[in-house]
Amino acid sequence: MKHVTSVFWYGLAVCALVVLWGTIAPEHLKSVTAEVTSFISTSFGWYYLLIVTIILVFCVYLIFSRMSHIKLGKQDEKPEFSLPSWFAMLFSAGMGMGLVFWTTAEPISHAFKNSPVAKEGSDQAIEQSLQFSFFHWGVHAWAVYALVALVLAYFKFHKDYPGLVSATLIPVFGQDRMKGIAGKLIDTLAVVATIVGVAATLGFGSAQINAGLAFLFNTPSNYGVQLIILIISTILFTISAWSGISKGIKYLSNINMGLGFLLMLMMLIVGPTLYIMNMFLDSIGGYLTNFFNFSFRTAPLDEDRSWINAWTIFYWAWWVSWSPFVGIFIARISRGRTIKEFMLGVLFVPAVICFIFFAVFGVSALNIEQQGITAISEYPMETATFAMLEQYPLGALMSFITIVVIALFFITSADSAVFVLGMLSSQGSINPSGVVKIVWGISLSAMAAIIVYFGGAQGLQNVLIIAAFPFSVVVLLMGYSFYKTANKEVMSKRERQKWDRSA
């Protein structure tokens, strides 16, 4: 613990206050944070839509810019991980358990429960359900992760700066400020966003694993079972985090992606295969056709913007709030890759994988409800996937594999978060001590357990969205800091002199 910084204690203190508030007055936490969240979504929804699109455009620009050849490391460095392991780890950390949760629930919701533009249950609503799912889980989300990860990797491995969010802003604000109170506040904000976001996800994950066990084995569906799941998972992901990225996290991520693709192929074979393929291609076309319309859709003449606030704005804020955690982890595993290779890999490969999973599981669920076999939309979100699987051949086997995949995603997301929290609270060390990682692992699970018990999950999500608002400004500043530094690096001598004179 001797290497930890004040950020460690600040982060623990803030999270302890949130937990205490949620324990003593969960309804008050929920109502207060809901009001703030509603204000941000209504008043600054346009801001989220604009900045996420700007970030995406900037990421695409970098692929073709003269900065694209810069290596995230020293010039002669080779990538630390193979492409398959790299993709598996960044996908497991970036989407993972959330993807398993939403691949069924989101298309069903858009089609039959709360359609964004069409009447629920109509052909248009069903067609567009997958398009909006692609939009929410596609390149916009990965652009936010990619920018934060790129900036952190560039300054850490190429410029030898500390592996901290605050360190990336030194070219903008100077070293003294970023080593002072302002820098500590920025790093503390990143810690709080990470621990709150992951704790909320752990709460959802334990509920979904519990729902799956109840479906398969009729186990009780209550807090006691979820607590046991959290305890077992904490032990497993702490062991994985202790063993390091090159061992535990890498192996678990590879196993998990293998099982995930096996499950997807099984569902593709036993499900409505032709319908899935047709909907996949049609939805890709619709997504590309409506890309800019979706990206800037604010419904200014629609008095009820509840769908946009509840889905698009929520997702954009969610990706921003998760960006310090996912960004730092992706940066850590991307050492030795060029900016062009990095951007192509992070932006497009995971997005395409998301599209495939949504098509296979989402369309299989839509088909069940369209045929009148059972109303998947009437099931709670955490049980929707299992309700769909039991209607197909090999449903019990696929449900069992789904539980294993969720559990592994659960562990890989958590141990990635523990590793990142260790970095942020240990002066940016890429090898934080095992003790620090254990403390963060226990803190994550304790927070998830207490919040779930006192019914404060919604309040926790609201805190996450609130934390995303100031951090979105940090993300934009990180992008500017990177451009200012990297662009100067690739300038010719004459251009650099002209730049210095103008500056």
Image (cartoon, rainbow, N blue to C red):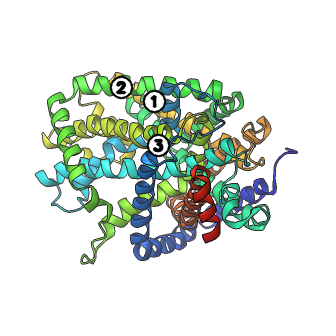
Callout 1–callout 2 Cβ contact below 8 Å: yes
Callout 3–callout 1 Cβ contact below 8 Å: no
The image's mark for residue 343 is 3
Name the amino acid, label 1: Val
Q: Residue at x 41, y 41 (%)?
A: 99
Q: Which residue is mark 1?
A: 405
Q: Residue at x 61, y 27 (%)?
A: 78
Q: Position of residue 32 (x, y in %)?
A: 54, 73
Q: Which residue is mark 2?
A: 263
Q: In this orientation, which residue lies closer to the viewer: 280 or 214?
A: 280
Q: Is residue 100 left or right of residue 33?
A: left
Name the amino acid, label 2: Leu
At mark 2, the secondary structure is helix
For the residues labelled 3 and 1, the Cα–Cα distance comes to: 27 Å
The quarter in which the C terminus is drawn is bottom right
Q: Earlier in the sequence, mark 1 or mark 2?
A: 2
Q: Earlier in the sequence, mark 3 or mark 1?
A: 3
Q: Position of residue 139 (x, y in %)?
A: 38, 48
Residue at the limit of the structure toward the front, as seen here: 494
At mark 3, the secondary structure is helix
Count of marks placed on residues: 3
User: Quick check: 256 above or below 103?
Assistant: above
Q: In this orientation, which residue lies closer to the viewer: 351 or 366?
A: 351
Q: In this orientation, which residue lies closer to the viewer: 494 or 308?
A: 494
State which mark lies toward you, 3 or 1. 3
